[in-house]
Amino acid sequence: MGNPIKIDYERGGRQKDVYDETEAINVPCPLCEKDEYREIYKERGVLGIVQCKDCNLIYVNPRLKNPEGVYWGDTDKYFKEARLIFEGKASHHRDPNYLEDLKLIHQYKPTGNFLDIGTNMGFFLRNAKEWKGWNLPRRCWPAQVGQSTC
Ligand SMILES: [Zn+2]
């Protein structure tokens, strides 16, 4: 993908670099509902990646009380934040993950309709457009951002 372009930009979302304990909540394992786990990683102050000691599921704990709130930002700022990616001048930092996931999905489902729920700005679908055999939604980006990008 070449060298990443380093630029200063203003983020479109409301994600913080650090959260405090009042913004997070402890949750039991979403698979087995047990509450014993080992911590794997901690980020942004209090957010954790843990592994359930009973069923081995890896999940986020503690997690944000209001995770969807990080996406409630200004649409114009979102577009400016991602403009180099939309213009094909930069890759997304998660492109290697997306490509690995797409390869795995393609092994099990090489054709058919493709839907990405919780698509953010559509960076995963942007990569899926390059694969043959899948029918993608007409709009590739969330409606507010995407009306001028698809
Ligand atoms: Zn579990």
Image (cartoon, helix red, strand yellow):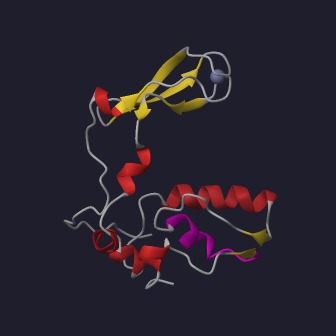
Closest to the observer, 5 or 46: 46
Closest to the observer, 146 or 134: 146
40 over 87 or under it: above or below: above
The image shows residue 12 at horizontal and vertical percentages of 30, 63
Give the tally of numbered discs: 0
96 over 20 or under it: above or below: below
Instruction: Locate the N terminus by quadrant.
Output: bottom left
Q: Which image quadrant for residue 138?
A: bottom right
Q: Which residues are magenta?
A: 123-133
Q: Which image quadrant for residue 37?
A: top right
The image shows residue 5 at horizontal and vertical percentages of 29, 69
Q: Which image quadrant for residue 75?
A: bottom left
For residue 80, side relative to residue 147 (left or right): left
Q: Is 80 covered by the magenta stretch?
A: no
Closest to the observer, 2 or 123: 123
For residue 34, side relative to residue 11 (left or right): right
Closest to the observer, 74 or 120: 74
- The quadrant of the rendered image in which ligand 1 is seen is top right
The image shows residue 67 at horizontal and vertical percentages of 42, 44
The image shows residue 30 at horizontal and vertical percentages of 62, 29
Which residue is pictured at 25% across the width and 38% down the height? 18
